[in-house]
């Protein structure tokens, strides 16, 4: 499932556009990896299904968890770069 989500999202953060090529261009960047985020969390019945998952860099992933309104799947969708 992870590979399908990464492929769908062209191996880049859906919020800021960061990808692994950026890591080699700027080694001081705090973004170091791509992570898979659940739009609807497991505790709320969210599935490990590509339709419920989105690729985020580690910085945006942390921000999504720290920002309370982004825990709502609709708000998360609005926050993501299209």
Image: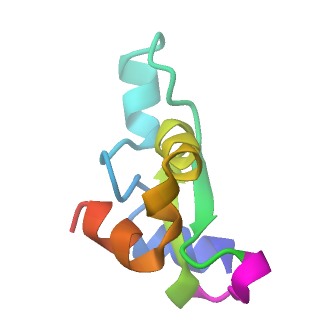
Per the rendered image, the range of residues in magenta is: 42-50
Q: Is residue 43 magenta?
A: yes
Q: Residue furthest top?
A: 28
Q: Residue furthest front?
A: 68
Task: State whether residue 12 is above or below residue 43.
Answer: above
- Residue sitting at x 38%, y 16%: 26
- Residue sitting at x 76%, y 78%: 42
Quadrant hosting residue 75: bottom left
Q: Position of residue 31 (x, y in %)?
A: 50, 30
User: How many numbered callouts?
Assistant: 0
Q: Position of residue 56 (x, y in %)?
A: 49, 53
- Can you see residue 80? no
Task: State whether residue 60 is above or below residue 47.
Answer: above
Task: State whether residue 13 is above or below residue 21.
Answer: below
- Residue sitting at x 26%, y 69%: 78
Quadrant hosting residue 25: top left
In the displayed structure image, the side of residue 78 where residue 29 appears, left or right: right
Q: Position of residue 28 (x, y in %)?
A: 47, 10
């Amino acid at each position: 499932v992870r590979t399908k989500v990464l492929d769908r999202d062209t191996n880049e953060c859906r919020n800021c556009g960061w990808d692994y090529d950026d890591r080699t261009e700027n080694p001081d960047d705090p973004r170091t990896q791509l992570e898979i985020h659940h739009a609807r969390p497991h505790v709320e019945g969210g599935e490990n299904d590509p339709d419920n998952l989105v690729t985020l860099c580690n910085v945006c992933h942390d921000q999504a968890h720290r920002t309370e309104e982004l825990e709502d799947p609709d708000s998360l969708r609005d926050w993501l770069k299209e």
